[in-house]
Amino acid sequence: MFSGSTISAVSTSPVAQQQGDTVIDAGGRFLMPGMSDAHVHLMGNANSYMDFIMGPTGGLYVNTLAEAKSMLHRGFTTVRDMGGDLASVKTAIDRGQFEGPRIFPSQAMISQTSGHADFAFVYQTPQAFGGGPSRTEEIGFTRVADGAAKVLTAVREQLRKGATQIKLTVGGGAASMYDPLNTLQYTTDEIRAAVEAAADYGTYVATHVYTVEGIRRAIDAGVRSIEHGHLADEDTVALIAEKGIWLSMQPFAEHDHSYPDPGRSAKNVQICNGTDAVYGWARKHGVKTAWGTDLLLEPASAPKQSEMAARLGEFYTNVDALKMLTSGNAELFAMAGPRNPYAAHQLGTIAEGSWADMLLFDGDPIADLSIIGKPDERLKVIVKNGVVVKNEL
């Protein structure tokens, strides 16, 4: 039973109905908590690179709101956004003005010059030398900051804008133009400055990084969530477990992203080739592992979110995969501490007092996880915040 925005009672026996109650007959279908995605870019999911650099700013937000609705209708009732000006979108959704998931926004992802989130054109003069901001900085998708002092300012800027956690890029990536995967980005002192500024606000830093050296530098500086980590070795994964740090992984396959040039395509292949081993070591060493998608700048690929959720079954039991998609991710989100906007109730569980975020699937995903990858066909009821968003029964 749910009343208002929360679950008021859970029972396996019939309960007394009150006049005016709405009853949904599940008919033996599978009830589970709303799913979550620990690494989305709602604005990046909804817009192409050309939209970013040439489109009107208002259009970016219209597309973002449309994708937020689509994401909710795939069954994702909570997401952690890892780069993009989402605070106002979050507020509009929380007020009920638009349909969409609960959002933990990071605001702009912070990068060094020539780093993973530096989307300036190569001919542009860096701001440190008197140049202007890039287009992605103007729209709040990224922030370039060099030196500990500027990093402090950049972190505090995102917190002022409503960030619940901070996203820092400390290594190379596939989507970016100027940084090979093996590059180390930000010194330990710069990363530590970000960690200290976030901690002063009661929250944490998550870092985009793939390699052994980059992960270890981030750990040394006090980072609490490693985003990606696909090129780690077993000793580094064991260290992540020992330190109690989160590994926010994505079950990447080569076809999840397409790149127009051979350099970025080769980086993508290298990342994908590391997926199996790192998941195996994470299971072996008991790493606290979150699940996310990190789909970016290809709006047509956004529906792959559901497919990637089902793909977790290649690496975990179906039960463990479902836990990761619900209560597991919720544990990571809770690290935002006093910055957590949804701390009043529990996310990711069906229990008395939890947020009333629930899904009803036609079929049993414990027996067949592929069911969650087919929301248009199998997802019959969606309840978010006590509101029935979808009911096809």
Image (cartoon, helix red, strand yellow):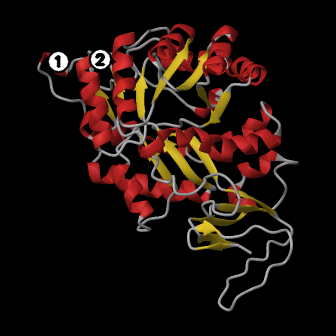
Residue 285 vs 24, above or below: the answer is: above
Instruction: Indicate which disc residue 100 carries.
Output: none
Q: Residue at x 43, y 18 (%)?
A: 170
Front-lying residue, 204 or 72: 204
Q: Note whether 86 is above or below 266 in the view shown.
A: below
Q: Is residue 350 left or right of residue 104?
A: right
Q: Earlier in the sequence, mark 2 or mark 1?
A: 2
**x then y, percent, for residue 193:** 33, 20
Amino acid type of the residue tagged 2 in the rendering:
Thr
Q: Are marks 2 and 1 in contact (CB under 8 Å)?
A: yes
Q: Residues within 10 Å of mark 2 (few under 14, many from 20)?
A: many
> Relative to residue 58, is residue 66 drawn left or right?
right
Image vertical order of residue 13 relative to residue 290, above or below: below
Label 1 Cα crowd, 10 Å radius (few <14 / some 14-19 / many 20+): few
**Residue 90 placement (x, y as % from top left):** 41, 54
Q: Which mark is residue 113?
A: 2
Q: Which mark is residue 128?
A: 1
- Residue at disc 1, secondary structure: helix
